[in-house]
Image (spheres, helix red, strand yellow):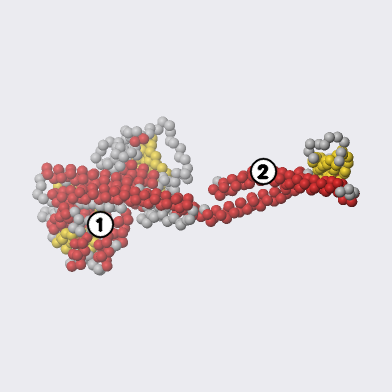
Amino acid sequence: MKVLIVEDNRELSSGIADYLTGEKYICEPAYDFETASEKLALFTYDCILVDIMLPDGNGLELLKQIRRDDIRSGILIISAKDALDDKVKGLDEGADDYVIKPFHMSELHARLRAIYRRKKLEGPSNLVSFNEIELNTDTVEAKVNQQVLDVTRKEFDLLLYFIVNKNRVLSKQAIAAHLWGDYTDNLANFDFVYQHVKNLRKKISTAEGTDYIETVYGLGYKFNTSKQ
Amino acid sequence: MKLINKITIWFLGVILLVTPVTMFISRNNIKKHLDQAEISRMTAVNDHVYKQLLAGGKPDHYTHGRPIEVSLYQGEMPQQKVQVRKENLAEDDMVKKECRISVDSYYPIGNQIYKISSYNFVLNSQEIFDGMLYTVAWKMLMMVLGVGLTARFLSRIILQPFYRAMKAIKHFDLKRGDSKLQLPHTTTKEFQELNAFLQKMTDKAAADYAAVKEFSENASHELQTPLAIVRSKLDLLSQTEIDDRQASLIGDMQSAIERLSHINRSLVLLTKLENQEYKTEEDIKFCTVTKQVMATYEDWIKMKDIRLRSNLDKNVSLQIHPVLAEILIGNLLSNAIRYNNTGGQIRIDLTRQWLRISNTGHPPDLPTADMFRRFKKGNQCNESTGLGLAIVKQICDVNDFSVTYQFEQGWHEVMVKFHQSESPTVADSGDNSREGQLAVSG
């Protein structure tokens, strides 16, 4: 997947690029409006990350250009403003989703992946699978070894999050934010995360799937694909 | 009282005061002139008679039919050659309305002094006055009507720029992006000054508002970006080869970042609430939002083994921004869960007038007064930023709700009353109820 990262802060941009390169994405940075506009005119990208506030322009203007030129990339807005009208405006202008700074890398990746799936840019769009685990994002159905798993919505989301970010350490905070959103105003319901992860692991094990999820002490969890 | 009514009353007052005075002056003047004219005429008549006497003619011919009397005067020549007498002869009804003026002229002819008297009746001043009164009454009536009508008519024209300026101010809203005050053109100097002043003031307010808004947005942006960098780098760091000790250090940092970003976001939200940025004209179904929020917290409630009872009225619609409604209920409910005992209870009641969320839990350990203040926490537990209830309070203030808290018989109870004026008074439960603070959540 080819991704254009339109973000004026070089460190954040390189952080995102680092993480996404690890997922075998090809990342190109654009640090200002001008460069981004040029790159969009010259190359095609599968996904575009757009920061709203740029030194020489507004990210929303970039969205207008993308729409005008009929560029069919997935668009994810990165915004520090959570002013509501920005969100609405961004989505009106054709963005597919948004994340608010500061975001977790795993969250950004999951959203990017979801956009990619929705845009039907890869394979059967509603299926995410890994070895014996198969997830259908349309029907919210999880299968292990072709056997339907009785999981709650949250557990499904959790498993999807793990598989999308496989072999990554996911902090408890990132998982909590993913499952319950930011607005809930709960600081890290770690017991909560623990409970859900525990239930999920139990259900996968019961279906005789491999217990890929391992605990990273003090930090969070990891979906370890090399586990047998 | 309307400005135009005030002006009218003042005008009428002046008319009422001035008219009697002018009437008095006119009456005196008229009377004086009438008398004077009569006196001059009679003096001339007397002179004429004298001249005829001198010429030796008989004045009979001239004085015939006229009230002229010629007689010999015994005594010294009076100092004044012409003497005027005014008499009111009251005995006769006809004469009552008039007064008699007699002019006596003395002429020395040879050794003798002749006295020639003539008299005439003139109108009494009372009569003049009566005659004037009728006119004046009409005059005043017409002036009152004239002033009243003209004032009303003119006020539409002259005061129109003023009324339009007032209307413009009434509809002026800083929150609108295009908040430029449109004032009507006027040729009146005072209104021109007023308009210029209003224009200047609203422009200043708009500029200030924009600056504050910009600052709050910039502050959030400037803080969120470094936070995003730290978080991204921590995420990357945790993907590297790390041992348990390093993992736990990174975990602690993640918690701190989480906390920091929550505090920042909450403060920005508070600023925006203060700026009245979340104005809405639409009604939302508050009951539906409540149900949604309850569903969000379902897991947590289950995990703490809390029994939740809810009694929600249907079709509770309120004019509040949907996001604010979510935050309001979310903060209250998460507090009710966080500060609950395991196996405790939560009650949620929603009516058209109020929302009440009560929960069991330890008695509060901070005074009630501090409860809704920022960064006040019951216990310094890590899960809280101390801004949750401050946000609740601010949301209530913005939407004209009132929020109260009390602790009674082991129950914490937060009551949000919508539309304070309409809500029925809820009796303060018990004098001996222990009021205190529900620890503020973040």
Q: Residue at x 19, y 46 (%)?
A: B254
Q: Amino acid at mark 2?
A: Val
Please state the horizontal and vertical placement of residue B230, each as a whole percent of the image. 18, 48
- Residue with the mark numbered 1: A52
The local crowd at label 1, few if under 14, some if 14 to 19, many if 20 or more residues have their Cα within 10 Å, is many
As rendered, which of B79 and B205 lies closer to the eye?
Answer: B79
Q: Position of residue A56 (x, y in %)?
A: 23, 58
**Residue at the image point whose x is 13% and y is 49% from the top:** B237
Q: Is residue B142 left or right of residue A126?
A: right
Residue A123 picture quarter: bottom left
Is residue B274 placed above or below A121 in the rendered structure?
above
Residue at the spot of label 2: B21
Q: Residue B77's spot in the image, x, y percent?
A: 82, 36
Secondary structure of the residue carrying tag 2 is: helix
Can I make out residue B300 in this image? Answer: no
Q: Amino acid at mark 1?
A: Ile
Instruction: Please tell me which residue is depicted at 12% across the width and 44% down the height of the picture.
Output: B246
For residue A121, above or below residue B202: below
**Residue A141 rendering spot, x and y as whole percentages:** 24, 59
Q: Is residue A66 found left or right of B360 in the rendered image?
A: left
What's the distance in space between the residues labelled 2 and 1, CA to CA?
A: 80 Å
